[in-house]
Every structure is written in C-alpha cells, then in structure tokens.
Amino acid sequence: MRLAVTAFALLAPLAALGCGTELHALDRAERAFTKNRYDVARPLLASLAESSERFAPADRARYCYVRGMAAYRSDDWREGRRYLGLAVAIDELDPGALEDASRDRAVQALERMDRAVYREGYAAAAKAPASSFDPEESTKAKRAKSPAPSDDDDE
C-alpha cells in the first residue's frame, strides 16, 4: 500500500506535466491559427488528436474549434464540418465551453458549408477557397451551362 501511494505521489506531477505540454501545444496552434498560419496549426492540432480526448470540456471545445476553423480556411471542408460540429456540440452540452464569438463564427461557417455541400456536394465546395465560395453563384453558373429545354424533347 505504501508503495502504491509513493508511486502515485511521484507519477501524478508527471501526468500533470504531460497535460500542460499538450495545452501548451494547443496554445501554439491557436496562435498560429490567429496569424493565418494554417500550415503550422493543422499538424500541431493533428498531433493532439488522441490526447484531446482527455482535455477539460472548455479545452476540448477550443481544440475542436481551432482545428475545424483551420481546416475550413484551408478548404478541407470535411474536417472543418466534423470539428466545428463537435465544438458546437460540446458547447451545447457544457454551456460556455466556447466563447460567444467563437461559437457564432463556428455556427456561421457550419451553415455556409452545409448550404454548399447539400447543394453541390464536397467536390464543388472544394473548387473555390472557403473565403470566396458562393453557392448561389455556383448554382447560377451551372444553370447557365446546361442547355435550355426544347419543345422537341416532349415528342
């Protein structure tokens, strides 16, 4: 019993140090994201995938938000929708896990991606950068390219 208590006393600070290192990596990824350095943020966030399961709800929501927005802005809408959806879901289960501004941006990005994906599919949504993709314009262009129905088609 004394050995178990001693082992716990020695290993507990190491476990806390590991979590602190992971949160430090999350902070670095978030800083890279805010500087539009998605090429730096995305690998850092991907390396935290397994350990993010152990984060507190607020840190898990922040991880999902940053990973989702970095993917969205890098035109990886599949990953963006997945992680932004998780961030919003975590915030619904634990209100306040996301800052209000972050939640609003996540919801807006999800709505925008959903409209485009439901209308055009992932392939069409990936053709243009997330910052400039307008699903209405894409639909108008598609209609303009298709031939108009003729009266001969009814025969």
Image: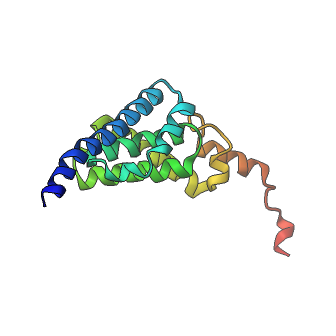
Q: Position of residue 137 (x, y in %)?
A: 64, 42
Residue farthest to the bottom, as pictured? 155
Q: Choose between 4 and 40: the one closer to the eye.
A: 4
Quarter of the view holding residue 25:
top left
Q: Is residue 74 above or below residue 85?
A: above
Residue drawn 45% across the image and 49% down it: 49
Q: Is residue 117 above or below residue 66?
A: below
The chosen color scheme is rainbow
The answer to whether residue 103 shows anywhere in this view is no
Q: Is residue 153 left or right of residue 144?
A: right
Q: Position of residue 23 (x, y in %)?
A: 34, 37
Q: Choose between 27 and 75: the one closer to the eye.
A: 27
- Counting labels gives 0
Q: Position of residue 80 (x, y in %)?
A: 50, 47
Quadrant location of the N terminus? Answer: bottom left
Q: Position of residue 75 (x, y in %)?
A: 59, 41
Residue farthest to the front, as pictured? 3
Residue drawn 83% across the image and 66% down it: 151
Q: Choose between 97 and 118: the one closer to the eye.
A: 97
Residue drawn 62% across the image and 37% down it: 129
The answer to whether residue 20 shows anywhere in this view is yes
Quarter of the view holding residue 38:
top right
Q: Is residue 113 left or right of residue 88?
A: right
Residue farthest to the top, as pictured? 35
Q: Is residue 154 left or right of residue 7?
A: right
Quadrant location of the C terminus? Answer: bottom right
